[in-house]
């Protein structure tokens, strides 16, 4: 990708994706997400300061004031990891705003991909976005790491997200998978078995309606530094403490927080050979 006059992280303030969300009737529909703030970490401090770590700015980037709108189509499934699955994304067009029809971009864009966060791993992707922002500020994006174009979020029903119901999607937590299946089938069936990772509080509820009524008891608690608290401190701006992600919890009940990270797609797939080696050098 040729050099650009602005950072890729400052290009877009919203994105519409085709093929990622469907209506309650099962019909795919375009879905729009807006740029969201990333989640700064705390700083590890060997000297254990009393309050904050000074002269270290951990603040996340703000959403670009003059950012454009990009329209994408979800394409080939590329792979998965602990926090989400990655898909190739085809660029349909770009416009100056959400309500303005898009047209082919008049500036160069590399091949793109989308990282779709798992429902309860969204905050981890928000943290990942923060690292991409800092790498961009340091001028390293496009040199040793792929370019990132922003972290975007919206809300929708868990049953509407098409990839979450496809065979190649594997949830890392049984509670997500079980809820997803029963919600998808709209089936208030009694619990047939109790997956090992479901919290004890769920066991007493026999019907889906009971879980919905008591969803507050299933909220995931914020991160707990535990013994690490003594060696971790916030920056002078309290970037971590004041972040909206600090006390974010995944809720089993709708609406779901839904998020993606838009990135540059690089390289060829690494296909294992019979010897276990790949067709790419690392």
Image (cartoon, rainbow, N blue to C red):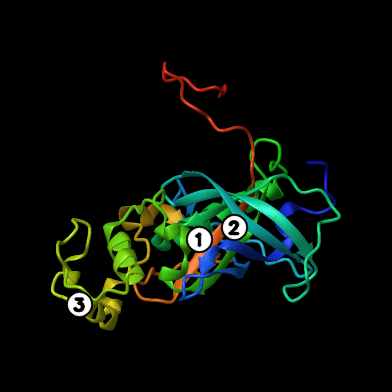
Residue occupying image coordinates x 42% and y 55%: 166
- Give the alpha-carbon distance from disc 3 to disc 2, as whole Å: 45 Å
Q: In the displayed structure, does residue 248 sit left or right of residue 236?
A: left
Residue 58's label in the rendered image is: 2
Residue 207's label in the rendered image is: 3
Instruction: State which mark lies toward you, 3 or 1.
Output: 3
Helix, strand or loop for disc 2: loop
- Front-lying residue, 111 or 122: 111
Instruction: State which mark lies toward you, 3 or 2.
Output: 3
Residue occupying image coordinates x 52% and y 70%: 27
- Front-lying residue, 223 or 152: 152
- Front-lying residue, 220 or 12: 12
The image shows residue 80 at horizontal and vertical percentages of 45, 45
**Residue beneath disc 1:** 234
Q: From what the image shows, is residue 55 above or below residue 13?
A: above
Q: In the displayed structure, does residue 122 sit left or right of residue 239?
A: left
The answer to whether mark 2 and mark 1 are in CB contact below 8 A is: yes
Could you tell which of marks 2 and 1 lies nearer the N-terminus?
Answer: 2
Q: In the displayed structure, does residue 124 sit left or right of residue 144?
A: left
């Amino acid at each position: 990708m040729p050099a650009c006059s602005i950072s890729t992280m400052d290009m877009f303030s919203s994105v519409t994706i085709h093929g990622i969300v469907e209506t309650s009737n099962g019909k795919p529909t375009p879905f729009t997400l807006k740029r969201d703030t990333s989640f700064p970490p705390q700083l590890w401090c060997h000297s254990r300061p009393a309050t904050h770590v000074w002269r270290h700015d951990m603040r996340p980037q703000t959403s670009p004031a003059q950012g454009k709108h990009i329209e994408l189509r979800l394409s080939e499934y590329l792979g998965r990891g602990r926090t989400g699955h990655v898909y190739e994304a085809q660029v349909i067009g770009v416009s100056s705003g959400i309500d303005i029809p898009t047209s082919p971009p008049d500036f160069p864009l590399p091949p793109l991909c989308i990282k779709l966060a798992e429902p309860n791993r969204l905050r981890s992707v928000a943290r990942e976005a923060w690292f991409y922002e800092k790498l961009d500020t340091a001028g390293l994006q496009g040199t040793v790491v792929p370019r990132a174009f922003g972290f975007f979020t919206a809300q929708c029903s868990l049953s509407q997200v098409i990839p979450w119901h496809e065979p190649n999607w594997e949830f890392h937590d049984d509670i997500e998978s079980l809820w997803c299946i029963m919600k998808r089938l709209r089936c208030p069936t009694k619990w047939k078995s109790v997956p090992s990772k479901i919290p004890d509080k769920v066991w007493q509820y026999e019907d889906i309606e009971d879980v919905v009524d008591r969803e507050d008891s299933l909220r995931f608690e914020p991160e707990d530094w535990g013994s690490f608290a003594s060696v971790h401190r916030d920056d002078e701006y309290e970037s971590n403490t004041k972040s909206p992600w600090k006390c974010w919890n995944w809720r089993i009940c709708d609406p779901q927080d839904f998020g993606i990270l838009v990135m540059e797609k690089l390289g060829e797939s690494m296909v294992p050979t019979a010897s276990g080696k790949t067709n790419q050098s690392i």
